């Protein structure tokens, strides 16, 4: 069974950096569009970033643009989220998601219901 497993979360101070990883286990095929979402305490899950299966196209929420970078290594079946200049408002559980339904090269997806599989989440806490 294919699973998505996030790692790299933790407790950091404002201004620090973290790199989250999302590894797909149980398969060798990796050509799926991917996304990162987060759920702050007491709030709804929100879009953070998306990346096409080639890695060429990316898109970010305005709140993280210029600070976060999404990338992928298809040979390793892994997607990354580099988070710099972290702020207390970035505190959330971060989830990676994968779209396994029909898609085209370069496509990006921004809504949670456009994704078919999710990881278990990793906690990121940013202290002020």
Image (cartoon, rainbow, N blue to C red):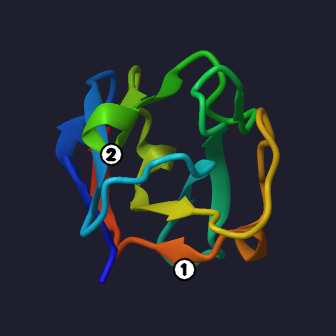
Q: Which residue extends farthest front?
A: 28
Q: Position of residue 35 (x, y in %)?
A: 59, 51
Q: Quadrant of residue 50?
A: top right
Q: Quadrant of residue 105?
A: top right
Q: Is residue 107 above or below residue 123?
A: above
The secondary structure type at the circle numbered 2 is loop
Residue density around tag 2, few if under 14, some if 14–19, many if 20 or more, within 10 Å: some
Q: Position of residue 9 (x, y in %)?
A: 22, 51
* Quarter of the image that includes the C terminus: top left
- Total marks placed: 2
Residue positioned 25% across, 38% down in the render: 76
Residue positioned 76% across, 76% down in the render: 113
Which mark, by number, is residue 119? none
* For residue 58, side relative to residue 67 (left or right): right
* For residue 17, side relative to residue 84 (left or right): left
Judging by the rendered image, the residue that carries numbered circle 1 is 42
Q: Is residue 40 above or below residue 82?
A: below
The secondary structure type at the circle numbered 1 is loop
Judging by the rendered image, the residue that carries numbered circle 2 is 77
Q: Which residue extends farthest top?
A: 66
Q: Which one is in front, 12 or 18?
A: 18
Nearest-to-viewer mark from 2 and 1: 2
């Amino acid at each position: 069974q294919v699973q998505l497993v996030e790692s790299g979360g933790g407790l950091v101070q404002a201004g620090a950096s973290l790199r989250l990883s999302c590894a797909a286990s149980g398969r060798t095929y990796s050509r799926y569009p991917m996304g990162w979402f987060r759920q702050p305490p007491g709030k709804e899950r929100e879009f953070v970033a998306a990346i096409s299966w080639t890695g060429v196209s990316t898109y970010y929420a305005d709140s993280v643009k210029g600070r976060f970078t999404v990338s992928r290594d298809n040979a390793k079946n892994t997607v990354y989220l580099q988070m710099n200049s972290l702020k207390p408002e970035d505190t959330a559980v971060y989830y990676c998601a994968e779209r396994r339904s029909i898609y085209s090269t370069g496509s990006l997806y921004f809504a949670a219901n456009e994704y078919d599989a999710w990881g278990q989440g990793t906690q990121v806490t940013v202290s002020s």
